[in-house]
Image (cartoon, rainbow, N blue to C red):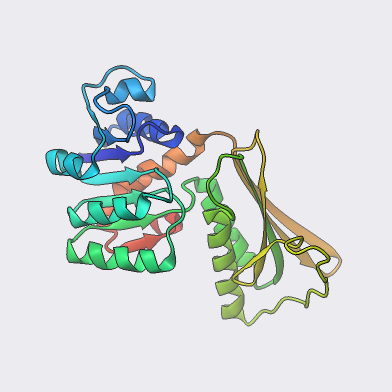
C-alpha cells in the first residue's frame, strides 16, 4: 500500500486530491499540510467524514513524523520549489501539480532527487484528456506546422500562459524540428504590442482569464484551404483526479524527474 500526504490540502485542488486518495483502495492517505486549518482533521477540511488525520502547517515536521511514500503538491508558484526541495531531501517522492517551476529549477530538483533516491513528477496537467490532446497536437504538427494555442482558465489562476499551453508548444516545436517542418511566415505587424499573443518555442499562445471557466485549451492548425482544431475542456477539478491517482501509484517505478504525465501512460 502506497502512503500519500497532500500539501496544499485546504485548497480547491488539494481537497479533491484528499478525497480521491482516500477513496482509492491501493493508496493510503496519511496526512495533509497547509498554512491554514492547522490541527483540523483532514477529512473535515476536505468536506468528508473525520479521518483522524492531522493537517500540519510545517512541511518538514510532517515529513519527519509521518514519512509518507509520496507527497502531492498543489500549493502555489511562490512556495512549490522550496516544498519540492524539502520533500526530495527527505527521500520522499513528490507529485507536483503546481505550475511555475522553471527549467533550471527542475534541473536542480532532479539532482536533489538523485542524491536522495527520490523521484519527482512535474505535470502541467493531470487530465488524461488533456494529455491526449497534447500528444495528438505533436503528432499533427509535422503535417500542419502553422499552429497557435488558445488557453482559457478562471480568473484566479496564478500564471499565464498555462503550464499546459507551454508544454504543448514545446511538444509541437520538437515534433516540427524532428520532421524538418516549417511554418509559413506571419506577415502581421502589431499595431498594439501583445495583440498577437506570446511566442513560446515558436508557437503563439493566447491566454484568456474569465470567471466561469475551469481549464480549457484549443490548438488551432491552419493548412491549405483547411483548418483543424483540437479542443479539450475540464469541466471540474474532478477531471484531474484519475491522473493524480495514477501518478501516485507509478512514481515509485519512474526514477528521476519526469516532466509531463504523458510519460506515465
Q: Residue lying at the far left in this picture: please name it.
A: 65
Q: How many labels does the image show?
A: 0
Q: In which quarter of the image is residue 71?
A: top left
Q: Residue lying at the far right in this picture: please name it.
A: 225
User: Foreground residue, 261 or 169?
Assistant: 169
User: Residue 79, position in %: x, y?
Assistant: 36, 49
Where the C terminus falls, by quadrant? bottom left
Q: In which quarter of the image is residue 91?
A: bottom left
User: Foreground residue, 167 or 77?
Assistant: 77
Can residue 144 be seen here? Answer: no
Q: Classify 102 as above or below 179.
A: above
User: Residue 11, position in %: x, y?
Assistant: 42, 33
Where the N terminus falls, by quadrant? top left
Q: In this view, does 233 lie to the left or right of 1?
A: right
* Residue drawn at the location 46% of the way across and 47% of the way down: 126
Q: Is residue 60 left or right of residue 21?
A: left
* Residue drawn at the location 28% of the way across and 64% of the way down: 256
User: Residue 194, position in %: x, y?
Assistant: 72, 62
* Residue drawn at the location 48% of the way across and 53% of the way down: 124
Q: In which quarter of the image is residue 113?
A: bottom left
User: Residue 97, position in %: x, y?
Assistant: 42, 48
Q: In this view, does 222 lie to the left or right of 234?
A: right
Amino acid at each position: 500500500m502506497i502512503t500519500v500526504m497532500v500539501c496544499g490540502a485546504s485548497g480547491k485542488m488539494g481537497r479533491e486530491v484528499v478525497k480521491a486518495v482516500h477513496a482509492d483502495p491501493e493508496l493510503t492517505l496519511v496526512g495533509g499540510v497547509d498554512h491554514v486549518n492547522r490541527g483540523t482533521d483532514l477529512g473535515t477540511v476536505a468536506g468528508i467524514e473525520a479521518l483522524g488525520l492531522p493537517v500540519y502547517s510545517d512541511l518538514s515536521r510532517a515529513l519527519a513524523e509521518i514519512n509518507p511514500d509520496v507527497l502531492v503538491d498543489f500549493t502555489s508558484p511562490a512556495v512549490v520549489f522550496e516544498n519540492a526541495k524539502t520533500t526530495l531531501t527527505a527521500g520522499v517522492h513528490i507529485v507536483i501539480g503546481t505550475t511555475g517551476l522553471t527549467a533550471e529549477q527542475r534541473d536542480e530538483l532532479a539532482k536533489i532527487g538523485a542524491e536522495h533516491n527520490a523521484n519527482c513528477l512535474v505535470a502541467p496537467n493531470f487530465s488524461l484528456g488533456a494529455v491526449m490532446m497534447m500528444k495528438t497536437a505533436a503528432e499533427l504538427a509535422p503535417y500542419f506546422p502553422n499552429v497557435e494555442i488558445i488557453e482559457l482558465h478562471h480568473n484566479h489562476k496564478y500564471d499565464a500562459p498555462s503550464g499546459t499551453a507551454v508544454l504543448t508548444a514545446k511538444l509541437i516545436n520538437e515534433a516540427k524540428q524532428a520532421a524538418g517542418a516549417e511554418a509559413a511566415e506571419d506577415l502581421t505587424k502589431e499595431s498594439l504590442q501583445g495583440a498577437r499573443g506570446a511566442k513560446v518555442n515558436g508557437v503563439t499562445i493566447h491566454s484568456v482569464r474569465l470567471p466561469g471557466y475551469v481549464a480549457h485549451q484549443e490548438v488551432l492548425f491552419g493548412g491549405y484551404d483547411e483548418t483543424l482544431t483540437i479542443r479539450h475542456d475540464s469541466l471540474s477539478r474532478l477531471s484531474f483526479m484519475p491522473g493524480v491517482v495514477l501518478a501516485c501509484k507509478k512514481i515509485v517505478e519512474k526514477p528521476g524527474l519526469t516532466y509531463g504525465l504523458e510519460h506515465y501512460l
